[in-house]
Amino acid sequence: MLLQGKRGIIFGVANQHSLAWRIAQRCAQHGASLAITYQNERFEEKVSKLAAELPDAFTLPCDLNNDAEIASVVNALRERWGTVDFMAHCVAYALREELAGRYLDTSREGFKIAMETSVYTFVAAVRHLEPILADRASILTLTYLGSERVVPGYNVMGVAKAALEASVRYLAYELGERGIRVNALSPGPVSTLAARGIRGFTSMLEYVRERAPFKRDTDPDEVGDAAVFLFSDMGRGVTGEVIFVDVGYHILGM
C-alpha cells in the first residue's frame, strides 16, 4: 500500500487498454484516491464505468487543450481534497496523415496540433495544478524512444516527445525547491488506441519482441508499477528523469 492516503489525478484514460488506466488501477491497488478525467462526452460513459471499478475514484471532464476546463478541474479538486499528491499526464495526439510518409512533409498545422496536444497540455496541466500541488508531490508523463532515435512512421510525434522530455527537465528544475518531482516513463510499444494509429505498429511489436533482451512485449502493468514507484515516497530522490520500461529494447545498438 505504497500510496495509502495519497490523492492523485490521471489525465488520458480512453478505454481499458489505455496505459493511463493501468496506472490508475495500480495506484488504486496501492491505496490512492483518484480523480480520472475524460476528454469529452464520447468517452464519458466508458471512463465512468472503469472508474466505478476502483474503490475511491471519481471522474471529471477535461480537454487539456482548453484552459477553462483545466481550471474547472483544479477548482473541483481544491474543493474536494484541498491538495493533490500526484499527477499522471498520458495524453498525445497527431493527425493520422502526419504519421505516414516523410517527416519532411509535416504540415504547419499538423506540427502545431502534435506539439500543443502532446507537449503543451503537460505544461498547462502542471501550471494550473501548481497552487494545489502538495509539497513533495510527484508528476509523471509518458514518452517513447522515438524522441531520441528514428522510428519510421513516428515522425512528428518523435519530435513532440523530444520536446516533452525537455519540458520534464525544465519543470523538474523549477519545481524542485518545493520538493516536487517531475519524471517521464518511456514504455515499449503497447497496443493502445493511440498506438494503433502508427503505420506498421504490428510489425513494430514483432520486431521489438524478437530483439529485446526479455524477448517479449512490454506488460502494461509494469508501466503502472513504475508509476506507483515514482508517486510513492520510494521515488523521493528521482526527478527530471526518463525511465525506460521497455523490456530493455532501448539499450540495443543494432
Image (cartoon, rainbow, N blue to C red):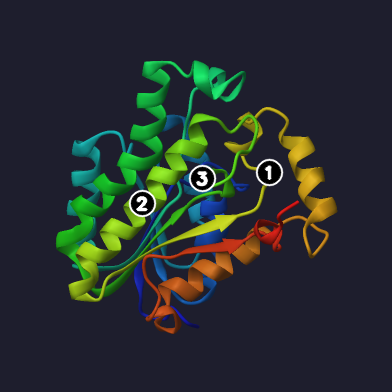
Asked if the residue under mark 1 is in contact with the one under mark 2, i.e. CB atoms within 8 Å, the reply is no
Q: Residues within 10 Å of mark 3 (few under 14, many from 20)?
A: many
Where on the picture, by quarter, is residue 136?
Answer: bottom left
What kind of residue is marked 1?
Answer: Ser
Q: CA distance from mark 2 to mark 1?
A: 26 Å
- In the rendered structure, the answer to whether residue 186 lies left or right of residue 248 reads left
With respect to residue 157, does 101 lie above or below? above
Q: Secondary structure at mark 2?
A: helix
- Pointer 2 residue: 166
Where residue 170 sits: x, y (%)?
Answer: 27, 57
- In the rendered structure, the answer to whether residue 76 lies left or right of residue 216 reads left
Where residue 157 sits: x, y (%)?
Answer: 50, 35
Q: Which mark is residue 7?
A: none
Q: CA distance from mark 1 to mark 3?
A: 19 Å
Q: Which residue is depicted at the point 37% across and 33% down?
A: 115
Q: Which residue is depicted at the point 37% across and 65% down?
A: 240
- Pointer 3 residue: 147
Where on the picture, by quarter, is residue 124?
Answer: top left
Q: Which residue is depicted at the point 32% across and 51% down?
A: 167
What kind of residue is marked 3?
Answer: Ser
Q: Which mark is residue 191?
A: 1
User: What residue occupies the far left of the structure in this picture?
Assistant: 131
Q: Residues within 10 Å of mark 1 (few under 14, many from 20)?
A: some
With respect to residue 1, does 114 lie above or below? above
Asked if the residue under mark 3 is in contact with the one under mark 1, i.e. CB atoms within 8 Å, the reply is no
